[in-house]
Image (cartoon, rainbow, N blue to C red):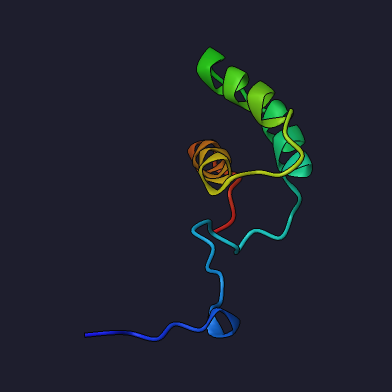
């Protein structure tokens, strides 16, 4: 069976959750005000460095937010 695939009809799909419209820098600054454990502090330090976030990095950020009750539902 041969399938014809046209690149012009392909649409990229993101893996990350796109519900959050607040920029990551704002979200990180809100988390800095919480009582974070050392592991979370280190992850946030790493997340502050990149210009563009990967879906995995956005997932880490969302997990920490949910753990401290400030994530969007």
Picture coordinates of residue 6 (x, y %)? 51, 84
Q: Residue drawn 55% across and 23% down?
A: 40
Location of the N terminus (image quadrant): bottom left
Picture coordinates of residue 26 (x, y %)? 78, 42
Quick one: 65 or 1, which is closer to the camera? Answer: 1
Q: How many labels does the image show?
A: 0
Picture coordinates of residue 12 (x, y %)? 56, 70
Q: On the picture, is 34 further left or further right than 3?
A: right
Give above or below for 40 relative to 19.
Answer: above
Q: On the picture, is 61 further left or further right than 50?
A: left
Q: On the picture, is 54 further left or further right than 66?
A: right
Place residue 42 in its image quadrant.
top right
Give above or below for 45 relative to 73.
Answer: above
Q: Which residue lies furthest to the top in this view?
A: 38
Q: On the picture, is 40 further left or further right than 22?
A: left
Q: Residue drawn 55% across and 13% down?
A: 38
Q: Residue drawn 53% across and 56% down?
A: 16
Quick one: 31 or 5, which is closer to the camera? Answer: 5
Place residue 47 in its image quadrant.
top right
Give above or below for 54 relative to 64.
Answer: below
Picture coordinates of residue 13 (x, y %)? 52, 68
Q: Residue drawn 40% across and 86% down?
A: 4
């Amino acid at each position: 069976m041969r399938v014809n695939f046209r690149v012009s009809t392909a649409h990229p799909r993101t893996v990350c959750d796109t519900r959050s419209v607040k920029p990551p820098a704002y979200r990180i600054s809100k988390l800095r005000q919480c009582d974070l454990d050392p592991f979370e502090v280190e992850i946030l330090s790493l997340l502050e460095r990149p210009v563009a976030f990967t879906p995995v990095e956005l997932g880490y950020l969302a997990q920490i937010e949910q753990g401290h009750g400030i994530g969007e539902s």
